[in-house]
Image (cartoon, rainbow, N blue to C red):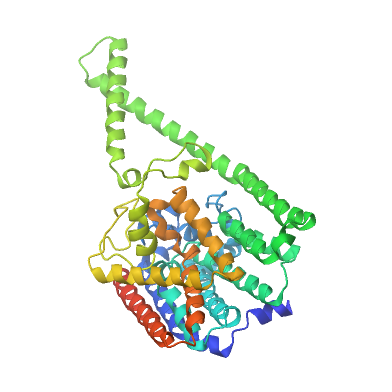
Amino acid sequence: MKKLIQLFKVRREEWLASAVTLVMLLALHALVIARNFDLFTKTNAGHWTVFIKNFTVSGFDPITYSVVTYWEPNYNVYRHPLLSFIVWPLSQLNGWLMDATGINLVQFVVAVPLLLCAFYTFVFMFRIFRDVIRLRFFDSAVLSTMLFSMAYVMVSAVVPDHFCVSMFLLVFTIYVAGMKMQAGRTFKIWQTVVLFFVTAGVTLSNGIKTYLYSLFTNGRKFFRLKYFLFAVLLPATLIWGFARWEYRTFTLPKEKADKAALAKKNAERREKMYNTFRNTTQLKDSAEIRAAFNAEMKRRARAKYLSDRQKPWNKHTGKPMAEGGFMKWTDATTSRASTAVENLFGESVQLHPDYLLQDTLRSRPVIVLYRWAVNYVVEALLVAFFAAGIWCGRRSRFMWMTLSGFAFDMAIHLGLGFGINEVYIMGAHWLFVMPITMGFLVKAIEQSRAAAWLRGALTVLTAWLLAYNLTLFVGYLS
């Protein structure tokens, strides 16, 4: 416990480096809270529909507001198996505050852990540059600030979704792995188990990254029978079994009840429509009346089907590679090239001013072009520095470990097409890889004459991203 407390003790230089980012995050949280303050603080309005309809920041879902206000496992249990139980203490705190104050303070209750996760993400990013890559203070501060100047890190840090928590857990795990590599140590079984349950419990794919980081850190020892059995196979089996239990215990009964209620409602509505049709038609024979009514209902169902196909939530979703299971979330038709330019390395890093922070399932097209050439210039420079950093760090096991998580994300997003229609939403899961690899570029040339030019370019790019994204985001919120 003493080592853990020491690990989270903030050093003086980390406070100095994080000052700008911390002030920015506090201000953004205030704007997010103020946006729906009057509505969301009403204790008689704190339910799913109110949050979903009125919280509109890109495709982020305010499920956490709903779960913390009235606790029940509303997250997808297979993608976020432990998240409902992780936020349960927040729900208890919020319930006590509602009883004491008479208002729903869920926005403040959720904002505090988000702010802590964002702040410590900055701290551990800074330590990765200082302690693992061994960069100077200025370079470490610029690259850490660059991460939070990126659009969907900035946004993820202040919206009530799980992405900021995932980002912190991944960056923390990368830092711990990096320090173990430097010391020539490996992950112990209990350390891997704890990190896996926490990371995978928030988002299942994070657990796979934890195993990738453990593989690079432990090397061949990862496959030793004792470690592989108790640190890998057993925890993976347990968390999947828990997700199945959670689905059968909480989700399935609710789905059955909702399905039965909907079927009853539809039957009553259909019977009412039939009675109206029967009383207004000129037909007399009951069989003819029923046949005519059924034909009319089929016509309406067909018209609704054709209408729904043009709605954003349907039109902006590509065709899956297969039906059923996880494959129903894949996408085989959305353009990968356009996605990479405009969304993956585009919207994730620089907001588009057109359709600003709109949801692809409501109004935003999947592909939006920038108005100005400067955005593409900035994107090209960032990707070039990213690629150069990979080349400069090609002999670093730590760099390849960090990049393995990025490769996994690209496989599921660009390969399988999972969430590809709004891939920028997942930016907080991998954007930190870009400045980390750039750190290897800085390290490689820090003694050369080009170092000053590189530092200047990275500083200008960071300043641009901060000013550009803050202007658009603050304008949207206010």
Q: Which corner quadrant of the image does residue 305 belong to?
A: top left
Q: Which of the pair 85/462 is nearer the observer?
A: 462
Residue at x 41% of width, y 66% of height: 152
Residue 114 picture location, percent across and down = 51, 70
* Direction from residue 186 to residue 364 in the image, left or right: left
Q: Which of the pair 380/113 is nearer the observer?
A: 380
**Extreme residue in the left direction:** 282
The C terminus - image quarter: bottom left
Q: Which of the pair 167/339 is nearer the observer?
A: 339
**Extreme residue in the right direction:** 226
Residue at x 44% of width, y 32% of height: 263
The N terminus - image quarter: bottom right
Residue 454 picture location, percent across and down = 40, 82
Residue 432 visible to the viewer: no
Residue at x 28% of width, y 34% of height: 306
Residue 19 visible to the viewer: yes
* Direction from residue 341 to residue 117 in the image, left or right: right
* Direction from residue 373 to residue 432 in the image, left or right: right
**Extreme residue in the front direction:** 448
